[in-house]
Amino acid sequence: MLKGKKIIVGISGGIAAYKICSLVRLLIRSGAEVKVIMTPSAVKFVSPLTLSVLSKNEVVINMFDEADPAKAESVKAGTWHITNGLWADLFVIAPATANTIAKINAGITDNFLLSAVLAARCPVCLVPTMDEDMYRNKITQRNISDLKKYGYRILDPVVGELASGLYGPGKMPEPEDILEFVNGQFVEKDLKGKKILVTAGPTVQPIDSVRYLSNYSSGKMGFEIARAAQERGAEVTLITGPVNLNGIKGVNRIDVNTSEEMFEAVKKNVKGCNLVVMSAAVSDFKPKKVAKGKIKKENAGLSIELEKTDDILKHLGKNKRGYKLFGFALETDNQIENAKRKLKEKNLDLIVLNDPNVKGAGFGTDTNVITLIDKRSVSELPLMTKYEAANRILDAYSGK
Ligand SMILES: Cc1cc2nc3c(=O)[nH]c(=O)nc-3n(C[C@H](O)[C@H](O)[C@H](O)COP(=O)(O)O)c2cc1C
């Protein structure tokens, strides 16, 4: 997504400035072209030389540094202080100090970074980072709120241990999170105003108080669908079985264990949805009886009697009210035929067929090979990341 994108990273004088070296590296690795502008205070916290090496570009700090030949031409043309702001596709200032935020809001341009911001035609993102009391101060809050109204894009600080030793809001999000935010700025918000419900992961069906039946679903595919939908502007609820995955900023996550809990959560949250994507691997069977406590080895029979769980997908297909319904099929034989039958039987609008036998597809991997099947067409897609696959599934909804 960032390939070929021109990004200015502005750094102001906060203790978290050292972490921006990692952000610059991540941006370069993602294929972006990066220029770094630092305030004179920022230089006290991190070396311009390091940032210059990492960004593969001259770092700009001073407004009046005519000695630098790189600047000679635009200085002569009288445009030196604004050219960077015109060059960029995106401007991100991290850490953004209380001072820099206040000056931007006041239109002050008494250093190079501030001039470039005021002259920028591209979107400007700010990552406010400071001590808790500075952050909570009404003046800082007013400045941030004003800048939001002017269209500045704010990545809120997180709660955590601050350099001052205090614990509270004001900490800069990790470079990986800033990268994700930057990525999100280039995504078209074609799902704005849409409400999307996604299910993910396995369910677990208890046998006794310590044992259960489950499957190998990692939840990755569903999480990537939720992430992509949120980035594209949708309001997303993600109902997930037990998985080892972090929550997604801006996504309402509901954790469940059993298929019954998932069914209840789906029924509660489906109202008003425009799209439901059922990517969870819900158990088809559950033990008929759940033993109290742990079944003793000596007392155990060698068979467990099973019964069918409620078919959530079927229920959603039967009771469709204003939403499109996408389901998943994991088939090993007669794949397309079986998937098409499921599409019809469950009244789906789209079925995503997974083939677990293909290299790089199925449970636990970061990639997938999927086929999208609807009433009119069958599109086989090549091996791609689950994030890309998620976007292709959402494209099928948005008509992109
Ligand atoms: C050790 C130290 C750490 C600081 N950390 C922060 C910070 O995280 N956020 C902040 O807003 N100011 C912080 N400051 C204060 C700023 O450096 C100061 O307000 C400076 O004028 C900011 O200038 P600039 O916005 O032009 O970079 C810190 C100061 C010191 C001495």
Image (cartoon, grey):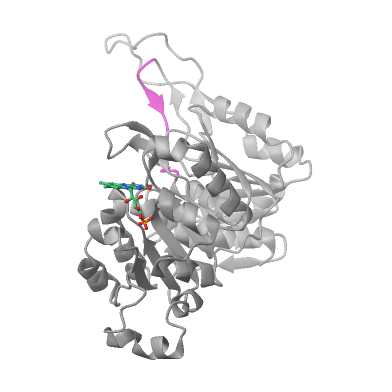
Instruction: Inspect the magenta stretch and tell me whether residue 215 lies in it.
Output: yes
Q: Position of residue 22 (x, y in %)?
A: 28, 59
- Quadrant position of residue 190: bottom right
Instruction: Inspect the magenta stretch and tell me whether residue 47 lies in it.
Output: no
Residue 67 visible in the picture: yes
In this rendering, position of residue 349 left or right of residue 60: right
69 lies above or below 292 = below
In this rendering, position of residue 48 left or right of residue 375: left
Main secondary structure type of the part rendered in magenta:
loop
- Between 78 and 36, the one lying in front of the other is 78
Q: Position of residue 120 (x, y in %)?
A: 52, 71
Specify the quadrant that holds the C terminus. Answer: bottom right
Q: Position of residue 288 (x, y in %)?
A: 51, 18
Give the residue at x 38% y 15%: 209
Give the residue at x 63% y 53%: 149
- Between 392 and 326, the one lying in front of the other is 392
Give the residue at x 59% y 57%: 232
55 lies above or below 100 = below
Residue 338 visible in the picture: no
In this rendering, position of residue 263 left or right of residue 323: left
Residue span colored magenta: 209-219
252 lies above or below 205 = below
Query: How many labels, in total?
Result: 0
Which residue is outermost to the right?
321
Q: Position of residue 117 (x, y in %)?
A: 49, 67
- Quadrant position of residue 10: bottom left
Give the residue at x 48% y 37%: 137
- Between 380 and 168, the one lying in front of the other is 168
In this rendering, position of residue 348 left or right of residue 133: right
